[in-house]
Image: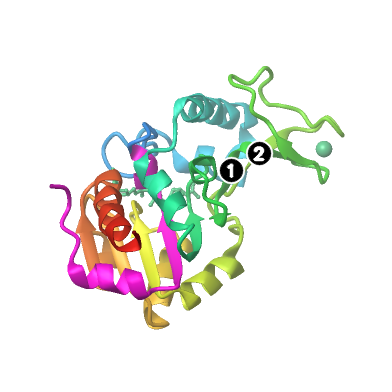
């Protein structure tokens, strides 16, 4: 059975050339990575200002790194799920970009090539004093906080914290403006600028398709709201598209 995909949406997708996709923590939930908001969410019980701001890091880098070490252990065990893989397959048929707020790297692991990691990547580090940037896949970390190989200062995770500029914002807005269809998958759409992208896409004429287990602020402007788990919805969608692509 699966999730019902309206014929009109299949038609729009078969005529589309450019596709933009915004993803959030919900797309990785079925890979076993907790989302942020709601009960059992990652932020619950963790003071965001302590573990996800520069001020918190300056105050207690060890605490912040222990928090990220735990997340890294969890993410190291996680594999891309069928939703990540479906998006990688779609990229072969479209001029397509995935804009993600996730730092788990699972879109790249699933094989998507055009990925904008707006909030950075948990496997990258950068120095707090010099220009060193690099990869660190050590799980668990041998030394907390880890030190810069160039200048021995404290390294920080190369992720975006509250109040910091996001990565790839210009490209992301360009994708939103140019897309024929814009998907919004598994995000509560509350954190800007990422949360503005569906509205920009809509203003510039895209068909906006939301995929979530519940409604969000984006549902009001979405042309299609497909309620269900990301894997189930994308399975059903891909099944319809594959029939047509054959
Ligand atoms: P949230 O935790 O705010 O929202 C997760 C969304 O995924 C919710 O709308 C859920 O309903 C939905 N969801 C959960 N399971 C799902 C599933 N199996 N299939 C589909 N949808 C599902 O996470 P984000 O929107 O990603 O930023 O949060 C955005 C940003 O806020 C994060 O990148 C992080 C956070 O604070 C920073 O750290 C800067
Ligand atoms: Zn350094």
Q: Nearer the viewer, residue 191 or 102?
A: 102
Question: Could you tell whether 123 is left or right of 149 in the image?
Answer: left
If the picture is divided into quarters, which one holds ligand 2? Answer: top right
Label 1 to label 2: alpha-carbon separation: 6 Å
Question: Could you tell whether 147 is left or right of 45 in the image?
Answer: right
Q: Residue 19's spot in the image, x, y percent?
A: 44, 67
Queried whether the magenta region covers residue 4, the answer comes back as yes
Labels 1 and 2 touching (C-beta < 8 A)? yes
Label 2: state its secondary structure: strand
Residue closest to the far left = 1
Label 1: state its secondary structure: strand
> Looking at the rendered structure, which numbered label has been put on residue 121?
1
Query: Which residue sits at x=41%, y=45%?
Result: 84
What segment is highlighted magenta in the picture? 1-29
Query: From this viewpoint, is residue 46 visible?
Result: yes
Residue closest to the far front = 246
Q: How would you rate the neighbour count of disc 2 (Cα within 10 Å): few for under 14, some for 14-19, many for 20 or more?
A: some
Q: Nearer the viewer, residue 244 or 221?
A: 244
Residue closest to the far bottom = 204
Q: Residue 43's spot in the image, x, y percent?
A: 39, 39
Q: Residue 167's spot in the image, x, y percent?
A: 61, 57
Query: Which residue sits at x=27%, y=58%?
Result: 243
Queried whether the magenta region covers residue 20, the answer comes back as yes
Query: From this viewpoint, is residue 35 visible?
Result: no
Image height check: is 175 above or below 126?
below
> Looking at the rendered structure, which numbered label has been put on residue 132?
none
Query: Which residue sits at x=25%, y=69%?
Result: 9
Residue with the mark numbered 2: 124
């Amino acid at each position: 059975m699966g999730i019902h995909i309206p014929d009109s949406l299949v038609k729009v997708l078969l005529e589309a050339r450019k596709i933009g996709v915004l993803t959030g923590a919900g797309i990785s939930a079925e890979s076993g990575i907790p989302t942020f908001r709601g009960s059992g969410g990652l932020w619950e019980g963790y003071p965001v200002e302590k573990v996800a701001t520069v001020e918190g890091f300056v105050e207690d880098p060890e605490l912040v790194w222990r928090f990220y070490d735990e997340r890294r252990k969890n993410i190291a065990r996680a594999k891309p799920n069928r939703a990540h893989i479906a998006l990688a397959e779609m990229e072969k048929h479209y001029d397509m970009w995935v804009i993600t707020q996730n730092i788990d790297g699972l879109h790249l692991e699933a094989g998507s090539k055009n990925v904008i990691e707006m909030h950075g990547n948990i496997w990258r580090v950068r120095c707090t004093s010099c220009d060193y940037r690099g990869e660190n896949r050590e799980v668990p970390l041998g030394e907390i906080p880890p030190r810069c190989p160039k200048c021995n200062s404290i390294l920080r995770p190369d992720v975006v914290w509250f109040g910091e500029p996001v990565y790839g914002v210009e490209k992301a807005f360009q994708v939103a403006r140019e897309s024929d269809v814009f998907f919004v998958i598994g995000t509560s759409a509350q954190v800007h600028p990422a949360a503005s992208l569906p509205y920009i896409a809509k203003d510039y004429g895209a068909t906006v398709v939301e995929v979530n287990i519940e409604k969000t602020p984006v549902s009001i402007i979405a042309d299609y709201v497909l309620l269900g788990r990301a894997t189930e919805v994308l399975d059903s969608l891909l099944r319809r598209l594959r029939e047509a692509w054959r």
